[in-house]
């Protein structure tokens, strides 16, 4: 069996004529925090959805923990999508019940403790909660699992800097350290300090995959600075930023 | 895992329908006393007041709303629950797509049966029956004795009744399976998904009618049908099979689409 937790080979995904991923080859081991970094439309969400089984690859294959995507891989993946996915009539405790029924690694007590520390009342109906509180509930659902692979799609997008720190702290203090966390984001400076590895995705292709230490040593600059350099948009009419 | 899925589907169903089913039954009871009023012990009078007109209207409106909501419920549980935002949760659960589809199908069928039962039960509640007489033990013992003797004389009645229920069930399953397939095919397109789903649903209806027309005009099939439908028992079983075979094919295609072509963009 492979040492890698997650493997993709020749992964290609298109939506109609538009290619979102173009031949991605990727191997990620267990026990690390990996940043999936790229500008909007670079294919980050597509790659994560393929790993979750929410999309099917056009060509190529991918495995998680040595298995093709299916019920087993779904049982070891904890996924935080970039949208709300629950019915409004439910309470947070209903969702905890559901997760406890379907995921053997879900820790109910931990979920309740996380709610308390995040200031969420788990017996309130979700439709009575603010958008921010709902996002916290979703974060609790994901981080209260002892998963092998956490797939976090833009967990800090659209929130203020204070909330970003708060979310990152929640992730770091609650994830299973034997598992791997894959965080997709374009807000590099906020996550750089917690990353072990960085994957740069551009127009559906991986253009860089290395440890953060290697990148800093080799390039002599931070991952954020390198990202800005690599993805700098050329201004029109030869103007300057 | 299927039972766990059913638990949550039925919980959602109960959340939505407990109120409307309760309202329909309560309004039926209100109508019993607002339309029919006891003149003396055995004479029932008919009320023609505005109040009774309003309660009848409310009752009919609730029944109509119940069936409309039942159709919307079945559509939404599939389109929003599996192909919309809630699909992000359902498709990341460690279950096979066929379990998700079967759970929705069972829940949808039970919902429609529940609505049918409420619609059938309501007239009985509204009927000007003397409940005090009805709940007496002697009445029930006589009634059961009569039914028992009737069934013993003609035991085939129970089989016919069961087969009739199976035909109704098959019809519901075929209808729901057609809706699921229409939505699943619509989901394959990036634009105008609802419009395409409606077109596919109409197309499926035309396709089924055409296929039936062609298949049953073949002499060999006619001979088989004649053998199968020599009596009422065979006719109803054949009718069920005729509906369940395409329903199974539709559901197989739905599962295949969810397994291989799922596209929650």
Image (tube, grey):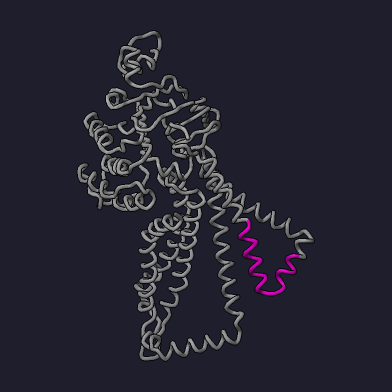
Q: Nearer the viewer, residue B203 or B237?
A: B237
Q: Nearer the viewer, residue A28 or B74?
A: A28
User: How many numbered dots are placed on residues in this image?
Assistant: 0
What's the residue at 59%, 71% (across, down)?
A: B163
Q: Nearer the viewer, residue B206 or A218?
A: A218
In terms of secondary structure, what is the magenta stretch mainly?
Answer: helix
**Which x, y percent locates residue A240?**
34, 9
Q: Is residue A186 left or right of residue B127?
A: left
Rendered position, A223 above or below A124: above
**Which x, y percent locates residue B247?**
59, 56
**Which x, y percent locates residue A104?**
36, 49
The quarter of the picture where the N terminus of chain B appears is: bottom left
What's the residue at 27%, 24% (across, down)?
A: A193
Answer yes or no: is residue A134 visible: no
Answer yes or no: is residue B213 visible: yes
What is the magenta range? B224-245
| Residue A156, quarter of picture | top left
* Magenta residue check for B233: yes
Rendered position, A222 above or below B2: above
């Amino acid at each position: 069996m492979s040492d890698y937790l997650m493997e993709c080979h020749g992964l290609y995904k298109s939506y109609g004529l538009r290619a979102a991923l173009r031949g991605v080859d990727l191997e990620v081991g267990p026990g690390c925090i990996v940043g999936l970094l790229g500008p909007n439309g670079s294919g980050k969400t597509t790659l994560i959805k393929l790993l979750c089984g929410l999309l099917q690859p056009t060509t190529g294959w991918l495995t998680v923990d040595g298995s093709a995507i299916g019920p087993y891989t779904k049982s070891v993946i904890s996924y935080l999508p970039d949208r709300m996915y629950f019915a409004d009539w439910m309470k947070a405790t209903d969702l905890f019940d559901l997760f406890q029924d379907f995921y053997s690694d879900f820790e109910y007590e931990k979920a309740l403790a996380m709610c308390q520390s995040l200031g969420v009342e788990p017996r309130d109906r979700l439709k009575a909660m603010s958008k921010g509180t709902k996002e916290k509930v979703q974060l609790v659902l994901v981080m209260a699992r002892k998963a092998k692979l956490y797939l976090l799609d833009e967990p800090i997008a659209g929130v203020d800097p204070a909330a970003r720190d708060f979310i990152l702290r929640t992730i770091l203090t609650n994830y299973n350290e034997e598992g791997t966390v894959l965080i997709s984001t374009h807000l590099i400076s906020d996550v750089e300090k917690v990353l072990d590895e960085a994957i740069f995705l551009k127009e559906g292709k991986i253009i860089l995959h290395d440890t953060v230490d290697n990148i800093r040593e080799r390039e002599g600059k931070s991952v954020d600075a390198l990202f800005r350099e690599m993805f700098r948009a050329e201004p029109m009419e030869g103007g300057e930023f | 895992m299927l039972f766990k899925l059913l638990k949550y589907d039925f919980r959602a169903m109960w959340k939505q329908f407990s109120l409307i089913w309760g309202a329909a039954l309560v309004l039926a009871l209100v109508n019993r006393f607002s339309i029919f009023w006891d003149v003396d012990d055995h004479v029932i009078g008919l009320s023609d007041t505005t109040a009774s007109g309003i309660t009848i209207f409310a009752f009919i409106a609730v029944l109509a709303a119940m069936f409309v909501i039942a159709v919307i419920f079945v559509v939404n549980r599939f389109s929003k629950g599996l192909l919309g935002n809630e699909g992000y949760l359902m498709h990341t659960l460690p279950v096979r797509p066929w379990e998700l589809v079967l759970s929705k199908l069972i829940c949808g069928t039970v919902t429609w049966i529940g609505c049918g039962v409420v619609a059938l039960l309501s007239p009985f509640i509204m009927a000007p029956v003397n409940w005090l007489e009805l709940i007496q033990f002697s009445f029930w013992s006589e009634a059961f004795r009569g039914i028992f003797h009737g069934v013993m004389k003609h035991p085939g009645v129970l089989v016919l009744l069961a087969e009739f229920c199976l035909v109704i069930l098959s019809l519901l399953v075929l209808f729901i399976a057609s809706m699921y397939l229409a939505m699943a095919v619509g989901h394959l397109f990036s634009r105008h998904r609802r419009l395409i789903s409606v077109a596919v649903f109409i197309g499926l209806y035309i396709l089924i009618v055409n296929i039936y027309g062609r298949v049953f005009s073949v002499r060999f099939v006619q001979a088989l049908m004649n053998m199968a439908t020599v009596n009422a028992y065979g006719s109803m079983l054949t009718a069920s099979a005729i509906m369940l075979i395409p329903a199974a094919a539709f559901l197989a295609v739905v599962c295949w689409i969810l397994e291989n072509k799922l596209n929650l963009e």
